[in-house]
Amino acid sequence: MAELATIARPYAEALFKAVGTDDAAQLAVQVEAVGQVAGNEQLLQFAGNPKTQPSQVFDLLSSVSKAALSPKVVNLLHTVIENGRLNALPEVAKQFRALVNSQRGVFDACIESAFPLDDAQLADTVAVLEKRFGRKLKPQVLVKPELIGGVRVVVGDEVLDTSVRARLEQMKVALTH
């Protein structure tokens, strides 16, 4: 996937420079929405068909998107489609969101929990994690019962694993060596 990241980076950076600071967060939502749609395997097959015109791909993609698209997002879509890089659009959305978050001083945090977290538990967990990582976090919670208990948190390239599963693995390694 390193190639896709390399392909997506110039698109994300160009959109970020074109947008400015005011509309970046709002456009990130639109870019993520079209990125999700562009990740659909059937759409990619349709776009990859040599008989399909770029305008047909754009019309289909924009019609599936529920919200009206900003002219800058429309320009991005035209550019990506015309350059045959539709498959990179989900990665463009991811990198654009990272640029917006970085500008705002916020970092994405993927919190994997064995059980669903209610609002109070999530707020407490985020407060502890922000103190631990020393930065403002935007949490995304995934429920993973295989963790047995505890949480596993990924912020950028840092991982904090306090799950029961991780502790059992550590005990297994300690006992077998």
Image (cartoon, rainbow, N blue to C red):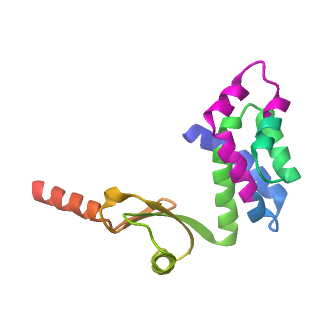
Compare residues 13 and 110 and report the one nearer the observer.
110
Picture layout, residue 108 above or below residue 58: below
Residue 128, percent from left and from top: 45, 80
Q: How many marks?
A: 0
Occupied quadrant, residue 117: bottom left
- Tell me which segment is drawn in magenta: 28-57
Quarter of the figure that contains the N terminus: top right
Say if 61 sits above or below 129 in the image. above
Residue at image position (55%, 75%) is 135
Using the image, determine if residue 170 lies above or below residue 83: below
Q: Name the residue located 17 percent from the left edge and 62 percent from the top edge.
A: 171
Residue 11 is one of the magenta-drawn residues: no
- Quarter residue 148 falls in: bottom left
Question: What type of secondary structure mainly makes up the magenta span?
Answer: helix
Q: Is residue 89 visible?
A: no
Tell me: 6 left or right of 55.
left
Residue 18: x percent and y percent? 84, 56
- Name, please, the residue furthest toward the top: 51
Question: For residue 51: magenta?
Answer: yes
What percent of the width, then of the height, locates residue 146? 32, 56
User: Percent position (x, y) of residue 61?
Assistant: 76, 39
Asked whether residue 45 appears in the rendered view, the answer is: yes
User: Residue 103 is drawn in which quadrant?
Assistant: bottom right
